[in-house]
């Protein structure tokens, strides 16, 4: 029995109060310089340190740990370790960050300080990445993606995992126009990709099947005729299979997509886990991909162009759903561009010509979307909202001009999805350009979306 008004005694330490990054100056986790220094020492050991332990003996080169060998090794590696530790500490000490009003402020340097202010309203995405090494120490990396090219990414490597999630939540809240202490918005699970479906989708691709058959044929030929030289040809094929099957499996294992007021939340990864949050309105264009063998099972993949992702970051973050039933994928397109239905847009076929007699292409538009469909072996449905179009242009190559054809491009920021209506008759193409440009202008004028979507 407890005294009136008193409950059971608390167990464990009291929970830590939440950190507000608008109060005071903040630094990275203290383990950051240690991890960076260890990484430099490991690279130095692999490149040259290991060779210092080798000694020529009567039986060949071997590792013989004599006092002279150990002294030689330490004479080289100890200074490298000291320099790596000093540089790691210098970098850690020189970086500070905080939130000042509507800006994220990052200050670097000790002798020469550099102060960078990042408007949160221009933030394109916030990712929390946990490489395998950081997961061992309970750390995470926060990546803030901004529009403006390859140098527009800001990294905080590393923070404690709870602190990283608090930073992500506060950045998203302030970017939305909410107070920084607003708790993380709830989410609604949308789709989870099972490992069986993910593995099957990677194996059910014509290039993968062809590479697998070639690999088996090369091995069979080598065994049957005792010709080991075929291994030189089989190894690149094996590496291609690893890149085409193993790499996507490792990247997208445990893939889940959830819907939240602060945007799309994607979680995935086996060796390196990633939580990607794309705020509303940041997806610029969408592609629904249906390879030939997937269509029998009704599967599709969604690729997207998100402003701010470029280069390697773009390749890692351009998949909205690696595999899902087709109706789920099309429903996701309707969620990315609210109030639209890409399937309901009427499409007109491309006129036949000897330039591309087997090409199948269609294009169409309504008041909200511009849609193209092309491909026979691998069918692709490209979708862009008129409000996201940056420009509309007409191009025609020499052969196209000879045939009176042209291609209409609805330009979005650089990314994997670029929407184009190919090989249209020039008269029709000019009409499409005028129509798309007018619709884009009206859509931008009536678009109620603001940078601070919560307002």
Image (cartoon, rainbow, N blue to C red):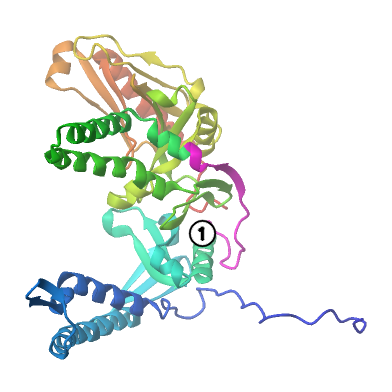
Vertical order, 404 against 87 (above or below): above
Say if residue 286 shows up in the picture.
no
Say if residue 2 shows up in the picture.
yes
Vertical order, 297 against 163 (above or below): above
Vertical order, 232 against 394 (above or below): below
The percent coordinates of residue 357 (x first, y second) are 24, 11
**Residue displayed at 30% across by 14% down:** 428
Q: Secondary structure at mark 1?
A: helix
Which quadrant is home to the N terminus? bottom right
In this view of the protein, which residue sits in the foreground, 169 or 88?
88
Residue 393 relative to residue 233: left or right: right
User: Where on the picture, by quarter, is residue 71?
Assistant: bottom left
Residue 198 relative to residue 435: left or right: right
In this view of the protein, which residue sits in the foreground, 222 or 410?
222
The percent coordinates of residue 255 (x first, y second) are 49, 47
In reply to whether residue 181 is colored magenta, the answer given is yes
Count of all numbered marks drawn on residues in the image = 1
How many neighbours does mark 1 have within 10 angstroms: few (below 14), some (14-19), or many (20 or more)? Answer: many
**Residue displayed at 55% across by 52% down:** 262
**Residue displayed at 24% across by 15% down:** 426
Residue that mark 1 sits on: 172
Vertical order, 358 against 93 (above or below): above
User: Where on the picture, by quarter, is residue 358?
Assistant: top left
Residue 265 relative to residue 156: left or right: right
The percent coordinates of residue 124 (x first, y second) are 41, 53
In this view of the protein, which residue sits in the foreground, 68 or 56?
56
Span highlighted in magenta in the image: 174-197
The percent coordinates of residue 383 (x first, y second) are 41, 30
């Amino acid at each position: 029995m407890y005294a009136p008004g008193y409950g059971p005694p608390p167990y464990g330490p009291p929970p830590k109060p939440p950190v507000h990054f608008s109060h005071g100056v903040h630094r990275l986790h203290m383990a950051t310089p240690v991890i960076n220094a260890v990484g430099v020492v490991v690279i130095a050991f692999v490149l040259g340190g290991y060779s210092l332990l080798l000694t020529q003996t009567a039986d060949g080169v071997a590792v013989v740990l004599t006092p002279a060998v150990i002294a030689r090794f330490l004479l080289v590696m100890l200074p490298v370790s000291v320099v790596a530790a000093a540089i790691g500490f210098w970098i850690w000490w020189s970086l500070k960050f905080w939130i000042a009003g509507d800006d994220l402020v990052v200050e670097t340097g000790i002798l020469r300080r550099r102060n960078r202010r990042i408007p949160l309203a221009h933030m394109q995405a916030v990712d929390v990445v946990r490489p395998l090494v950081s997961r061992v120490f309970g750390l995470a990396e926060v990546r803030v993606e901004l529009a403006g090219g390859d140098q527009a990414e800001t990294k905080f490597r590393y923070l404690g995992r709870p602190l990283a999630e608090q930073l992500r939540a506060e950045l998203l809240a302030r970017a939305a126009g909410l107070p920084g202490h607003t708790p993380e918005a709830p989410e609604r699970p949308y789709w989870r990709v099972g490992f069986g479906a993910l593995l099957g989708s990677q194996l059910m691709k014509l290039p993968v099947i062809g590479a697998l058959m070639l690999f088996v044929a090369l091995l069979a030929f080598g065994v049957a005729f005792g010709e080991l030289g075929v291994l030189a040809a089989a190894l690149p094929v094996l590496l291609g299979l690893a890149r085409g099957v193993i790499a996507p499996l490792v990247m997208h294992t445990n893939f889940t997509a959830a819907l939240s007021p602060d945007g799309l939340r994607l979680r995935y990864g086996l060796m390196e886990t990633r939580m990607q949050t794309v705020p509303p309105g940041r997806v610029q264009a969408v592609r629904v991909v249906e390879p030939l063998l997937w269509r029998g099972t009704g599967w599709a993949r969604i690729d997207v162009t998100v402003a701010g992702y470029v280069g390697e970051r773009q390749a890692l973050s351009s998949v909205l759903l690696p595999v899902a039933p087709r109706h789920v994928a099309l429903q996701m397109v309707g969620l990315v561009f609210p109030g639209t239905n890409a399937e309901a847009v009427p499409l007109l076929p491309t006129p036949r010509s000897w330039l591309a007699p087997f090409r199948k292409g269609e294009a169409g538009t309504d008041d909200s979307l511009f849609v193209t469909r092309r491909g026979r072996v691998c069918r692709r449905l490209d979708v862009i909202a008129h409000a996201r179009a940056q420009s509309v242009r007409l191009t025609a190559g020499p052969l196209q001009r000879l045939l009176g054809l042209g291609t209409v491009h609805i330009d979005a920021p650089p990314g994997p999805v670029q929407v184009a209506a190919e090989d249209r008759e020039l008269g029709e193409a000019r009409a499409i350009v005028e129509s798309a440009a007018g619709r884009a202008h009206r859509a931008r004028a009536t678009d109620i979306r603001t940078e601070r979507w919560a307002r």
